[in-house]
Image (cartoon, coloured by chain):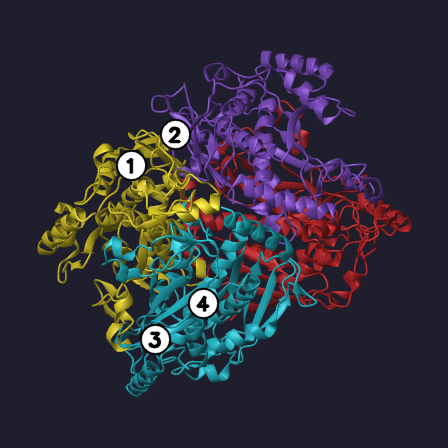
Chain colours: A red, B purple, C yellow, D cyan
């Protein structure tokens, strides 16, 4: 059973995570984690905080001589901007944030108690955890990418591009966008929103390939992999929609147009020529790439703030303004890939178990042989 | 902690569920459960099975003199069509179903072992469990509805309709559709698909009102209510997309257009004049109605079946044909409402605890007073 | 992940259980379950209820043609003595039972609402679930027994007896006691207590053999197998103590006397010549037989009832008298073995995973080879 | 839901913990945590490590201005003796430790990979977490103590001493022993064992008072408080037995002797004049003090080591000798109190919920009024 908890506030001393349940014998390259942390911080349209924090991972436990030993990994990212105890109270809740509901829930008149934890700063730790899961998945040749599909009303077009083409183009792009033309328009859109004190949302896509058939389960509702992925992605701040494969657009097509016919060849075994299911049928992986898309609402902190209420005086006012990004869709994509990798790693461990990487691989290979001989 | 497990196969003896964690003292009206079960079975475009099964709930435990006593509820729905042990083997997997991945996973050449449990028949038990949760939520005046928004390419228009208007119109409609004009077109679309041996998907919406602010949490990723709702909805067979509030369409708007400004009046307390957040901010309810939408892919069993492979001979063939619906979007909406009600009941019990309904209500009232006095 | 929930009241319609997480392909012999149910009902000193109920298992789901198919098993035991809605209110709480605390918890003046679920009748379902786990463990040659060690002040002596000797003797004994002399004295003790309107407790032992090294974990407190076993055994009504191996008596010995020295031979691999650890070191199995002992308090319902309070009038009175046993130690031993088998099956599935019995065995065999080649 | 994970190895950089689920508004006095950490390190018979480590807690998150804010607490204890990467391999497993089973499980020939996490050093973090729970329980006047009952064959006698008398005497004692005469003999016993290169175990008792009736539940086996406490205590390294109230000695008494008769007075409400149940009936607290006892086996690392096997050569040898205590029963008692406090805090939060301490107390007070008015 792979599981994790995170802790830490936006302006607290640090972010902390514990990842429990990895097998022994996995080599962890700290640099790969730092790369993912850097990816999360990049992105045209990010705010000043990204210049302050240069996130680096500290692995406090769980490794010996660079390898996992079956004990939990404790992770720490230091906050340079540690000032939670001196920052002023927040009394004008920002629409779109946890501020107001959190204040009522905790019965506090200082919403900083809420927003410090509700902040998306927490997702840096999820990225670190996801990076470790990604290293683990790499042992099974499972590869993943994330790329931005739209920002505001500007859409990228990546039809016909291969996994590798999208991956490389997105990695080079300051907006994780694989379509150069769209990217230029997106940047203009961000500039415009910034000038106007406004913010933008968008959509992005996660693709994960080389996952074997049969991860997840249809046997009980809470064991379905599609359900777990949906929870993991929707748990990311500002995500308001999740779809798998053809998703919403598939709902208006005919059955004969959308279901992925089944073929077989000696070399490939069973395969499909389309992937409208996005790699998931019946709550399980079906051997095709996992394709997940998320909708992110625009950043809720606006430099031209929306109408709000002073929670002490109950008078009309403008919402508080915290330092914020204009657009963080590329960053959210990095977080989403991390969460997807966690879910797949969890499903892989659930299916193949094993206390050492060696044992897990042995079980995995046995299953692959079973499938090939089917 | 409210939780449930279900058991039962499509052509097994019965469907069984255990719902654990309801407080004592809740009066359960069996008829209300049967009504929801009947709602799930209705719907223009349903197949022959719906005529065979007239689901009725049997409550085997957890009640004394018609009320809960704090012990788990065991529920049973008999299958009239009990023949799992005599039905023939399935060897031509249906694209879009669990058949093939399940066969590889279980290493079975008879996919009936898979599809009997992977069948959406299981959702009848979820509806029963959700109906009990709905009765429980009724004690707090929390009301819910589900209605169909689109079938195939035909969309309903319900802009400007109130909760009650939509609710009443959808209940009277054989397609749970609150727009009569659209309904007529949808029925024509279903007729056409049926004639052509094809199937249809669609989208539907769940609305839940009168939920207090502060259910759910931002404090840990797996305690967010948006994440739990997403999992619960995505766990329903054939659901490929979930969105909250403005969802995907909100991702292409500006922050200034989409976030719900905060207002206050003595009578209402804090309130909003819009609900693009769909009642959820920061993983918590914000006092506005919960608005959830799902995309359902077309039924995967086609009377004109898709190309498939005989898993024994590995030869090309057509997929097996099981008895199936042409369109089950209204039924999926009933299931989704049930799952949403379960999630909200769970969140309510998590927030207010209490072993008796009386204690839960006392805690709940204390919180409402706290909010009013805020 | 193997898990179960039970439902049902003592005088309700039936007891129900759902067991989720068994692999596909396990043949279930219903008779073996009924045998365990009968074992739970036997025992010198049992009350009238045991003559009314002749428990038989109904498997409502999860099997096809006698084998598991990876879907949850739903189990049902009918109560012949179904009269929960007509039985009178209980208003004089019995010391030693859940009656009073339950009444305060639920705020009910009729403690039947409490005792119907708090009754040990519920353990019949646990025995059925444990029996299925036992059948599963049998596929790995893991065998278990339970036998009574003491009733009241009479102790059995089984030093020097082998697993098989104890097993056979206990099975033939009406008190599950492997020491015939002690058994005679125990029966006399029970007769005496019965005559005097009193009740008896005792201790019993569970032994499970052929478990491989390495089930469970030391890596996180809640994943230790000793912790899970302790919870499972202490959760049985009337159990007030649990010990592993030498347990309490080991606490007064020296380290040099108690720890089990390690030996090695080509044939056996690593082995011990003593088993004071009871098969568990560091929260994991160590390859030696699991040895668990429990203390059961005397039955709390006395025919000569103890002082109590009428909860309505608050006047002094005698506790209510429900139909009850004089001594149920043998039955508790059967329940404890069932719970132990569940825990070991769970740990086995956690370590070896696999969706089919075939896959699980392949993974298991791979591990055994790994250990042999160590 | 209160939960925690720990991480960290014996000679790693630090021990880390995350405690998730405390309400907002709880003042945390760091000194009280450090006091409990110091208590765990004291004890006549401890080894050299205790002189190296002077554990101090670092609270990295979850507090603002000294109070909880509803977000998870991250805790860190630095290891002065950080050298995990340079310490030599261990190849001669110590009987009584995780060494051998862990090596087989992980398939490693260097058992340091195992023992670094399996070490009882981890329990320092549990003590810190328990101390925070104890501060929380203090808000409800729930008080706890731990004291040593026996070391080796020497037993303390505390019959007739009050909670406060035992508490004060045990706190002043280097062996947490409330009986001065016994303590002197215990010290002599420890000296003797030390001289002989041997080790000692013993038993200790936890008492927790002022817990209201009705925490825990009888409704489902895994929700019983007795089961949770048994798991929490048995999860402590070297604990081989757990008993509640009269425990094993109660198993040989008559029902009429052991069950705690029920009385009532206006001032006290329902009460008992005895507490053989140890405060738990039917898996719930009954308002009387919780009384828990544990058996600890002797320290498994012996200066005169036991026979073992070199896992590389498979030749007979002596077990490895790591730095170790002769007796750590007092320390285990501190850990056990911490775990008991965690369980009770968890049960309290489960029963009374509430996001702020204020709300939790309001719910709690409402329940106390309900009980008083019963």
Horizontal and vertical percent for residue B290?
Answer: 68, 36
Q: Position of residue C292 (x, y in %)?
A: 27, 58
Q: Which mark is residue C85?
A: 2
Crowd rating for badge 3 (residues with CA inside 10 Å; few <14, some 14–19, many 20+): many
Q: Would you say the residues marked 4 and 3 are in contact, meaning their CB atoms lie under 8 Å apart?
A: no
Query: SS class of the residue under badge 2?
Result: loop
Q: Position of residue A307 (x, y in %)?
A: 86, 45
Kindly report which numbered mark, 1 or 4, lies closer to the viewer in this rendering: 4
Q: Is residue B261 visible?
A: no
Q: Which residue is mark 1?
A: C27
**Nearer mark to the viewer, of 1 and 3:** 3
In the image, taking residue A180 as reference, residue A219 lies left or right, namely: left
Q: CA distance from mark 2 to mark 3?
A: 56 Å
Q: Which residue is mark 3?
A: D299
The x and y percentages for residue D77 are 56, 73
In this view, the residue in front, D242 or D101, is: D242
* Subunit ID for the residue under disc 4: D
Q: Is residue C257 left or right of residue C312?
A: left
């Amino acid at each position: 059973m792979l599981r994790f908890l995170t802790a830490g506030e936006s302006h607290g001393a640090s972010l902390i995570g514990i990842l429990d349940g990895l097998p022994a014998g996995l080599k962890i390259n700290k640099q790969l984690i730092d790369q993912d942390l850097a990816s999360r911080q990049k992105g045209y349209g990010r705010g000043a905080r990204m210049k302050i924090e240069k996130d680096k991972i500290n692995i406090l436990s769980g490794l010996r001589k660079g390898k996992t030993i079956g004990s939990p990994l404790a992770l720490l990212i230091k906050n340079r901007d540690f000032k939670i105890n001196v920052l002023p109270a927040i009394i004008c809740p920002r629409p779109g944030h946890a501020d107001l509901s959190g204040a009522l829930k905790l019965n506090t008149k200082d919403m900083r108690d809420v927003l410090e934890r509700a902040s998306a700063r927490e997702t840096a730790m999820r990225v670190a955890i996801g990076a470790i899961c990604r290293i683990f998945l790499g042992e099974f040749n499972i590869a993943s990418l994330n790329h931005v599909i739209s920002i505001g009303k500007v859409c990228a077009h990546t039809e016909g591009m291969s996994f590798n083409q999208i991956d490389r183009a997105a990695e080079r792009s300051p907006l994780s966008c694989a379509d150069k033309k769209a990217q230029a328009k997106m940047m203009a859109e961000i500039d415009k929103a910034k000038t106007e004190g406004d913010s933008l949302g968008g959509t992005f896509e996660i693709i994960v390939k080389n996952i074997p058939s049969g991860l997840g389960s249809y046997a009980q509702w809470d064991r379905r992999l599609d359900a777990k992925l949906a929870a993991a992605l929707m748990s990311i701040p500002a995500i308001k929609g999740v779809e798998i494969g053809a998703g919403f657009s598939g709902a208006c097509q005919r059955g004969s147009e959308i279901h992925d016919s089944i073929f077989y060849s000696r070399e490939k075994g069973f395969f499909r020529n389309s992937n409208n299911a996005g790699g998931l049928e019946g709550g399980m992986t079906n051997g095709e790439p996992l394709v997940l898309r998320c909708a992110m609402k625009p950043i809720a902190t606006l430099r031209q703030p929306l109408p709000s209420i002073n929670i002490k005086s109950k008078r009309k006012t403008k919402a508080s303004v915290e330092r914020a990004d204009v657009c963080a869709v590329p960053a959210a994509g990095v977080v989403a890939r991390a969460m997807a990798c966690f879910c797949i790693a969890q499903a892989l461990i659930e299916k193949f178990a094993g206390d050492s990487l060696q044992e897990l691989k042995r079980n995995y290979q046995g299953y692959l042989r079973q499938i090939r001989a089917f």
